[in-house]
Image: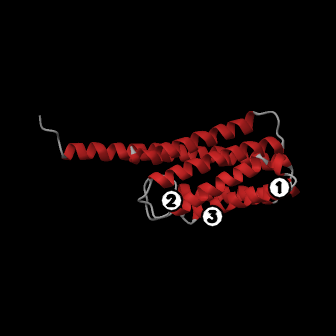
Amino acid sequence: MKARIPILVDLYKGIAAIVLGILLFFYPDKSSHFLFNTMGFFWMAIGLTSLRRGQEDERYAGKYTTRIAGIVAILTGLLVVTRRFTSRLMSDETIFFVLGTVILATGILHIFDEVRIGGFTTNRLTRVQFLLGLFEVLLGVLLIFSTRMETPVLYWAATAWAIVYGVLFLGTAVKQYLQQRQEKTGSEEENPAYE
């Protein structure tokens, strides 16, 4: 079961991101409140799955970075979702700046292979990691400067990011599943069961 946890986590992240992208695309209220609430809930969910993955995937050298990223994602998601209650302590601009900074940092970690995508370590940066990291860096920068931007630009950028994120994670989950299945089939052919 441990070998399947990274696949299930990536599958969950992919589905959650695509659902987020579809919600952002079709929901008629294109306001910043809806955008940030959905992103807050998304980051909390991603943080929880990152903690689970860091727990189960002990063989990966970046497991501590994954755990720290999971905790930061949960805290950031909570901060964004509860901004109505924390508005006395922090302005919306500060909270959006924090969310943008976390997304920017996540993108940089993906680009430099500290938080990996997929269940197998390749010891090299993959195109998927680079592309996702690039999208996250761009979205993070947009969120950091969101107070000076029109909401639709930010909204459509977040929608595109969510859909690309989802497709990349679903593709990675399918690739991992097929690779594990091929390895299992290969080992069964090498060691046939005797009756």
Amino acid at pointer 3: Ile
The residue where tag 2 is placed is: 126
* Location of residue 173 in the rendering, given as x and y in whole percent from the top left corner: 48, 45
The residue where tag 3 is placed is: 108
Closer to us: 78 or 29? 78
Which numbered circle lies on residue 167? none
The residue where tag 1 is placed is: 146
Q: CA distance from mark 2 to mark 3?
A: 14 Å
Amino acid at pointer 2: Thr
Quarter of the picture holding the N terminus:
top left
Amino acid at pointer 1: Ser
Q: Going 85% across and 57% down the picture, which residue do you hit?
A: 89
Of badges 2 and 1, nearer the viewer stands 1
Closer to us: 96 or 24? 96
As drawn, is 18 to the left or to the right of 25?
A: left
* Location of residue 46 in the rendering, given as x and y in whole percent from the top left corner: 61, 48
Of badges 2 and 3, nearer the viewer stands 3
As drawn, is 80 to the left or to the right of 49?
A: right
Q: CA distance from mark 2 to mark 1?
A: 30 Å
Q: CA distance from mark 1 to mark 3?
A: 19 Å
Closer to us: 153 or 44? 44
* Location of residue 128 in the rendering, given as x and y in whole percent from the top left corner: 54, 54
The local crowd at label 2, few if under 14, some if 14 to 19, many if 20 or more residues have their Cα within 10 Å, is some
| Mark 3 element type | helix
Of pointers 2 and 3, the one earlier in the residue sequence:
3
| Mark 2 element type | loop
- Give the colour scheme shown: secondary structure
Quarter of the picture holding the C terminus:
top left
Q: Are marks 2 and 3 in contact (CB under 8 Å)?
A: no
